[in-house]
Image (cartoon, rainbow, N blue to C red):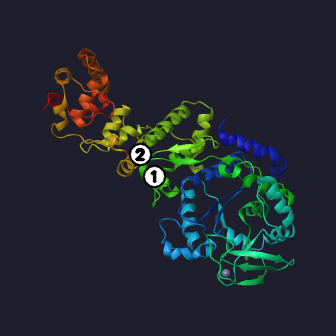
Amino acid sequence: MFWAHKIADEVERRYADKIKSGEPIVVRDEKTASGKVHVGSLRSASLHAITADVLRSRGVNVNFWFEINDFDPMDGIPSYLDEAEYKKYMGVPLCNIPSPEAGFDNLAELYGQEYVKVLEQVGFGASVYRASELYRSGVMNDLIKQALEKRDLIREIYYRISKSEKPADWYPINVICEKCGNLSATKVTGFDGENVTYECSSDTIDWAEGCGHSGEMSPFDGNAKFPWKLDWPAKFVAKGIDFEGGGKDHYTKGGSRQVAEAICREVFEHEPPYGVFNEFFLVGGKKMSSSKGNAATAKEMAHILPPHILRLLLLKTPINRQISFDPEGDAIPILFDDYDRLAEKYWSGVEDDDTQLFKFIHLPDERGEFPQRFLPRFSQVAFLVQMPHMDIYEEVAKMKEGELTDLDIAELDMRAKYAKQWLREYADGKFIFELQDSLPEIAGTLTEEQKVSVSKLADKISETDTLDGQQLHELIHEVKDESGLSPKEFFSTIYKLFLGKESGPKVGWFLSTLDRDFIVNRLRLK
Ligand SMILES: [Zn+2]
């Protein structure tokens, strides 16, 4: 069963009465907008978006929220920000830190909006709100009051579940210092039911500097923020969440999910939402794993893959299993091949997990008939776009053995666009080919046996009437078998002569794209 169906089944089982009443099932995801969002966050996005999507496809009323968490403090400076300039904001809520780029109200808006755009592009869009708005709206006030009044119970829960010990004078909230604006450097020292007293000091935490101010203020209406393990369950209650999972790192024994659930039940007296964890998304390759700049961001991933192929990458692996992806190797051609396999299955009328997956990798507004079209292999398109002498439409029509329809052409244009981009920006050298106009130097390394065998191939090709891929494939294998050379010795000879490399695309097909005289001459080392 497609994994998202299992999750949706469980949501339907748990909330059967609510669904029956027509009340919406509330799903939530959030991301702290402290920098360019890592591609790994798309896993959490896919978990929540696809659960909402599957539920809606079953006729369930769903409210799907995405929170730009702009109220967390800055707790690290990304490598692409000026450290000297941003150091003073360590501990300050992200929504109160200036954006490094003009046109955004604050730093969190810059990165949050950039990520929301990616989510929309991939079809994971939701109703967006900000954490700062949630706190400022007063919705959190009663939860803050309850937490301050039940701080001993919270201390006991922290210890019971995560063995973390908080001092007897600890209060489960941080206020924003009225004088310097720091959140992490403040320490609440008392609560009288309406106001808290606090101190802002550099002794509170290692990485944020306080100003030395001490004062008294209301912790309500956006003046204060919960630490994460309380922030999470408070949001469950405030937004009335029914389904929300999270990263595997939160789901360890004694981790923040267990603490959040216990606080939700015991402190806020509210049943926590159903949720499952999502595994990590690892990105390999030199160009992606670099810590500088654009590398492994969600935005970059949405740039190198078209939306439905990115959805395929995110959805084909069960959510509780890791994804590893290296765009420099053959991961992208393989993803397109996976798509082609699912599509052929769907068009042949099969109904199984694969065809369920096929349906959901398309954006909701693309779902319908999925009209059949010719799907040229991505690896072959990637080869063709490197051969300036070839008419790519003509070559693909030959592959199809028929004229290309408008849909075929649109598909080919899309693949050609992404293939060119892949070759230009990521593909390893072994995928880069250049047809050699003159005999390449590497031909000098051929043995006598190799030279004799390709000259025999030249003779046979010059004797044939037509030159199609299948016929060439058979001829080539005939000559190879007679030559006494190993397949590698034989085929590498051909690649060396035409591409100046040891390897290349399927040889029969490749030669069929070339002019016969050119092939014959080159095989005769001219
Ligand atoms: Zn201060």
At x 71% / y 76%, what residue is drawn? 186
Please state if 305 lies on the left or on the right of 351 as rendered: left
* Between 501 and 68, the one nearer to me in the picture: 501
| Cα distance between the residues tagged 1 and 2 | 9 Å
Tell me the number on the disc at residue 328: 2
Q: Position of residue 167 (x, y in %)?
A: 79, 66
Q: Check disc 1 and report the residue beneath it.
A: 288
Pointers 1 and 2 in contact (CB under 8 A)?
A: yes
**How many other residues sit within 10 Å of disc 2, few (<14), some (14-19) or many (≥20)?**
many
Please state if 93 lies on the left or on the right of 13 as rendered: left
At x 36% / y 41%, what residue is drawn? 381
At x 18% / y 25%, what residue is drawn? 447
> Which quadrant is home to the N terminus?
top right
* Between 141 and 289, the one nearer to me in the picture: 289
Tell me the number on the disc at residue 115: none
Q: Position of residue 525 (x, y in %)?
A: 14, 30
* Between 375 and 1, the one nearer to me in the picture: 1
Q: Is mark 1 within 8 Å of ligand 1?
A: no
Q: Secondary structure at mark 1?
A: helix
> Is 376 located above or below residue 520 in the figure?
below
Residue 61 shows up from this direction: no
Hey, which quadrant is residue 72 in on the image? bottom right
The tally of labels here is: 2
> Which quadrant is home to the C terminus?
top left
Please state if 348 lies on the left or on the right of 174 as rendered: left
Amino acid tagged 1: Met
Q: Secondary structure at mark 2?
A: loop
Q: Position of residue 127 (x, y in %)?
A: 66, 62
* Between 239 and 341, the one nearer to me in the picture: 239
Amino acid tagged 2: Glu
